[in-house]
Amino acid sequence: MFERKTKDVIVRVEPDFLSEQSSPSDDRFIWAYTVEIENQTTTDLQVTERFWQIADSRGQVQEVRGSGVVGEQPVLKPGEVFRYTSGAPLSAPSGMMLGTYKMESPDGESFDVDIPAFLLESPHEPLRLN
């Protein structure tokens, strides 16, 4: 599991290669990733936006921006954890993802929370970091 803490908000990510949905002969490699966002602050926080960078081992980089996560803009009370699972397709057998969530408090203050960089590794090509 990959973990990052920003301003008393912890983001944990667990990627999982989906071999049954992937087709290496067609350059289609599919991952699911489960994210937990834990609010360790003393105020409610709402996830209002997401930003992802997805890079594969062949040098292709995609950026994804959008409102909230998985169609929601969840509000996390102090001590609460929001958990969701999403997916990422690549045309290469390995890669990595990282990003940010924009959080907003009831008084209108907003700040970015880092999503830890995490590896997307398949059994078809382990990713090697230099």
Image (spheres, helix red, strand yellow):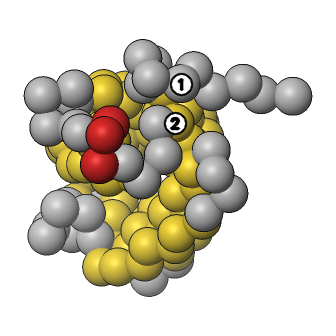
Q: Position of residue 75 (x, y in %)?
A: 22, 60
| Residue 88 in sight | no
Residue 125 numbered mark, or none: 1
Query: Which element is circle 2 on?
Result: strand
* Residue drawn 24% across the image and 39% down it: 23
Instruction: Tell me the quarter of the image containing the C terminus.
Output: top right
Residue type beneath disc 2? Ser
Q: Local crowd at mark 2 within 10 Å, few (<14), some, or many (≥20)?
A: many
Residue behind mark 2: 94
Residue type beneath disc 1? Glu
- First in sequence: mark 1 vs mark 2: 2
Instruction: Tell me the quarter of the image containing the N terminus.
Output: top left
- The total of numbered circles placed on residues is 2
Whole-angstrom CA distance, mark 1 to mark 2, is 6 Å
Query: Which element is circle 1 on?
Result: loop
Q: Position of residue 96 (x, y in %)?
A: 56, 42
Front-most of residues 69 and 15: 15
Front-most of residues 84 and 52: 52
Front-most of residues 130 and 118: 130
